[in-house]
Amino acid sequence: MKMSPEARAASPNAGSAQRSSVIPRTRADIVTPALVLDLAALQGNVARMAAFFAEGPCRLRPHFKAHKTPEIARRQLAAGSCTGLTCATVGEAEIAAPFCDDLLIANEVVTAAKCARIAALARRIRVTTAVDSLAGLTELSRAAGDAGSRVGILIDLNVGQGRCGVEPGEAVVTLARQAAQSGSITLRGVMGYEGHLQPIRNRAERESRTRKAMSGLVNAASLIRDSGLPCEIVSAGGTGTYDISGRIEGITEIQAGSYALMDTDYADVGVPFEQAFWVLGTVVSRPARDRCVADCGHKSMTKDHSLPVVRGIEGAKVTSLNDEHATIALPPESTIAIGDRVELLPSHIDPTINLHDVFYVVEGEKVIDVWPIAARGYPEHRMPARLEEHS
Ligand SMILES: Cc1ncc(COP(=O)(O)O)c(C=O)c1O
């Protein structure tokens, strides 16, 4: 079996004499609970999204936070139509920087220590960060000045999600002006994430509300330009709205992430991507004819959007997740037995993948590679040298 150098380094058994007996060759050999990735489905999703963005002026900036896996991000970039990657955290950006030279941190970063890390990255690659306050802007400007780099910024606009972001109107221009006047900062544009609209099941409603939200973002960009300032990037979008926001005049890039691997929540939204990963578990108990229990609880997958769905077993339904148990209701005639495998499709991709160290990559029954989820958790806490540098 082929194993990438990164995977080898991440393997708990790397270098041990037992390695060949520990690395699985087939799905049946994978120790559970584990994340399994269907390579063909991933490639199909990545190609479909790249083809959509090859058609229009708007570009794709895949969100790394969805999977935190360099091997997947490399494939997304190689498929084309991308301006770079989106990250949610500085730690993700540090993991992505060796293979991507244009990163957007689509999130507010305000502490001196984190701004210093962004400024250090900006000496090597192009880094752009969302900003919604003078406090954040000032800290970034100071850090970039100290590092001798330039950090790009996008003014983050609240387009209705009610999370971060300045309110539409004069506040956008005020902050843009302050950015343009800040040393070591380059004003690149605006972003507005319509996260509250992604899960709307009804396509007509999703479309009309997205158009309204995006007109606010495009207006904000016009206000900035009308005041004589640059606004080259107008960034928005996710997997539920990529084909709406991504075709609106004036939106220049889309931050979709979940499309690469999908989850059952997005499957209900009706987007044209396949489920490409699942949590593999083993049945550890069949205490009743109508019930079995597997070893994959909510320490191996999230249940924040709903319970997972059982793949490929007619009539089976997860009824609860505990720390290390998935309880599954079965039709009484089910022959499922202790030791059998179950495949559970998570309802929410990002927090599920974040719980695991690696993906077992499969083609049919064969395990063809092991990919480290290198940016899982908060990687800076695994880099003591870097912490010392900034203490
Ligand atoms: C700021 C931002 N942009 C884009 C996305 C990508 O969305 P999705 O994974 O739904 O495609 C998210 C997801 O939460 C987000 O928070």
Image (cartoon, rainbow, N blue to C red):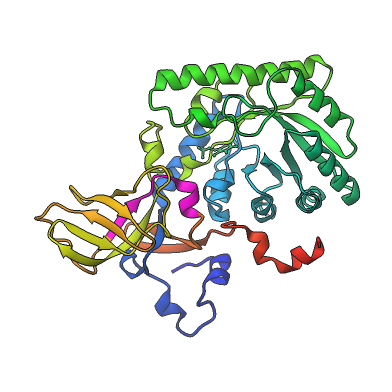
Residue situated in front as seen by the camera: 281 or 330: 330
Q: Is residue 210 visible?
A: yes
For residue 116, above or below residue 183: below
Q: Is residue 235 left or right of residue 327?
A: right
Residue situated in front as seen by the camera: 135 or 49: 135
Q: Position of residue 81 (x, y in %)?
A: 59, 35
Q: Is residue 289 magenta?
A: no
Q: Is residue 249 visible?
A: no
Residue at the image point whose x is 28% and y is 58% from the top: 342
Q: Is residue 222 left or right of residue 161?
A: right
Residue at the image point whose x is 87% and y is 51% from the top: 147
Q: Residue furthest bottom?
A: 17
Which quarter is ligand 1 in?
top right
Q: In which quadrant of the rendered image does the C terminus lie?
A: bottom right
Q: Position of residue 318 (x, y in %)?
A: 27, 51
Q: Is residue 169 left or right of residue 63?
A: right
For residue 365, above or below residue 312: below
Write down the quadrant of residue 379 in the picture.
bottom right
Q: Position of residue 185 (x, y in %)?
A: 84, 37
Q: In which quadrant of the rendered image does the N terminus lie?
A: bottom left
Q: Is residue 347 magenta?
A: yes
Q: Position of residue 46 (x, y in %)?
A: 48, 42
Q: Is residue 228 left or right of residue 1?
A: right
Residue at the image point whose x is 37% and y is 31% from the top: 270
Write down the quadrant of residue 173 in the picture.
top right
The span shown in magenta is 342-353
Q: Residue furthest top?
A: 226
Residue situated in front as seen by the camera: 38 or 300: 300
